[in-house]
């Protein structure tokens, strides 16, 4: 019930409209934003390992692709109205973990 009220207050951002027109038709409907978030969570360890071992040729492009999934899952949740406060919090925690891990490896 709370999630229904939360989803009615969603406002699409300008980049959401671009993703809706260009990328969203290519994404299967069974693929939820939560799936993308879990994928990003699982990819933190390989990215950190690659950057820690200074394999930047693979680590940096992988980090950038994982960063792009951050924008994709948020937009997909707003476009399809499948977001929830829990997912928003989980996404935020994973985002901070990925950034801190990558910055720790670069110093």
Image (cartoon, rainbow, N blue to C red):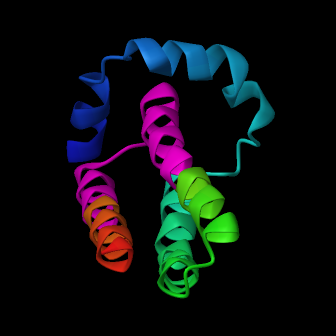
Q: Position of residue 4 (x, y in %)?
A: 30, 37
Give the extent of the magenta segment.
67-94
Classify 93 as above or below 23. Answer: below
Q: Can you tell which quarter of the image residue 28 is in?
A: top right
Q: Position of residue 61 (x, y in %)?
A: 64, 57
Nearest the viewer among 79 and 70 is 70
Q: Work out whether residue 1 can be spotted.
A: no
* Residue at (54, 75) in percent of width and height: 47
Pinpoint residue 34: horizontal percent, then vertical percent. Answer: 49, 58
Q: Is residue 46 visible?
A: yes
Query: Measuring 60% from the left and 69% from the top, which residue is drawn there?
Result: 56
Residue 35, quarter of the rendered image: bottom right
Which image quadrant: the N terminus? top left
Residue found at x 27% / y 70%: 100
Q: Nearer the viewer, residue 19 or 62?
A: 62
70 within the magenta span: yes
- Tell whether 99 sits left or right of 51: left
- Location of the C terminus (image quadrant): bottom left
| Occupied quadrant, residue 53 | bottom right
Secondary structure that dominates the magenta span? helix
In the displayed structure, would residue 93 be above or below residue 30? below
Is 54 on the left or on the right of 81, as rendered? right
Task: Name the residue located 54 percent from the left edge and 45 percent from the top edge.
Answer: 68
Q: Is residue 102 magenta?
A: no
Who is closer to the viewer here, 11 or 64? 64
């Amino acid at each position: 019930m709370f999630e229904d009220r939360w989803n009615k207050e969603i406002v699409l951002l300008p980049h959401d409209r671009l993703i809706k027109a260009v990328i969203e038709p290519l994404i299967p409907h069974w693929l939820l934003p939560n799936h993308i978030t879990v994928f990003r969570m699982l990819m933190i360890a390989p990215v950190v390992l690659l950057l820690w071992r200074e394999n930047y040729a693979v680590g940096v492009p992988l980090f950038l692709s994982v960063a792009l999934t951050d924008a994709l899952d948020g937009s997909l949740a707003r476009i399809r109205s499948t977001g929830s406060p829990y997912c928003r919090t989980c996404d935020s925690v994973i985002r901070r973990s990925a950034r801190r891990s990558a910055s720790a490896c670069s110093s």
